[in-house]
Image (cartoon, helix red, strand yellow):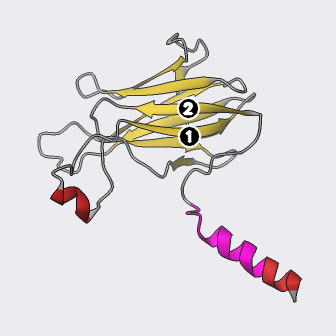
Amino acid sequence: MKISALLFLAVGLTACHTPGTWQSPQGDETATLVFTSHYIAAQPLICRSGQELVPTREALGATPIDPELFANDQAGEDQGEVGVRIPAGAPITLGVRFDPKNPAGAPEACTARARFTPEPGQRYQAQFVMPGAQCGLSITDEDNRAVAAANRETASCP
């Protein structure tokens, strides 16, 4: 009886996770990654090992819809940043997707990708930029130094 109750609870808790979004790993072999975009509405993406780029639960440049926000005139505020934990010690591909909702006169949809090897316990920033109509992604460490192994990535997840 106790085993079936625990199994039911475990299955129920698993169902609460959105399978199509990034699930941050736990433990010491992780690093912190903070996505930023300076007021550009975009979706951070992380390569799930051996699969495809999956979105984070939060998007950049957008506030979740909440009726109370309209009462406070805060709707449309910039999300600013999205922080996640990523596995460290092995190369990881990440990206940011820009998909304009009003395509008339807006830049075309694009995805910028980069690949680097995070070190355990370190903090990194992935800055999404759009100079002109081009997508760009730069990765820096906590001292604001460019991560030497970060390169624009055009292929799918490894």
Read off the residue under disc 1: 84
What quarter of the picture does the C terminus occupy? top right
Residue 142's image quarter?
A: top right
Read off the residue under disc 2: 33
Residue ranking furthest to the left? 105
Q: Is residue 13 magenta?
A: yes
The span shown in magenta is: 7-19
Report whether 4 appears left or right of 158.
right
Q: Residue at x 59, y 69 (%)?
A: 16
Q: In terms of depth relative to the viewer, which is nearer, 14 or 6? A: 6
Amino acid carrying mark 2 in the image: Leu
Relative image position of residue 132 (x, y in whole percent)? 23, 23
Q: Are marks 2 and 1 in contact (CB under 8 Å)?
A: yes
| Of callouts 2 and 1, the N-terminal one | 2
Report whether 94 appears left or right of 51.
left
Relative image position of residue 38 (x, y in whole percent)? 30, 29
Q: Is residue 154 at all visible to an observer of this figure? A: no
Residue ranking furthest to the bottom? 1
Q: Residue at x 18, y 53 (%)?
A: 72
Relative image position of residue 42 (x, y in whole percent)? 35, 41
The crowd level at tag 1 (other Cα within 10 Å; few <14, some 14-19, many 20+) is some
Relative image position of residue 3 (x, y in whole percent)? 87, 81
Query: How many angstroms separate mark 2 from mark 1 (CA)?
Result: 5 Å
Q: Residue at x 39, y 41 (%)?
A: 97
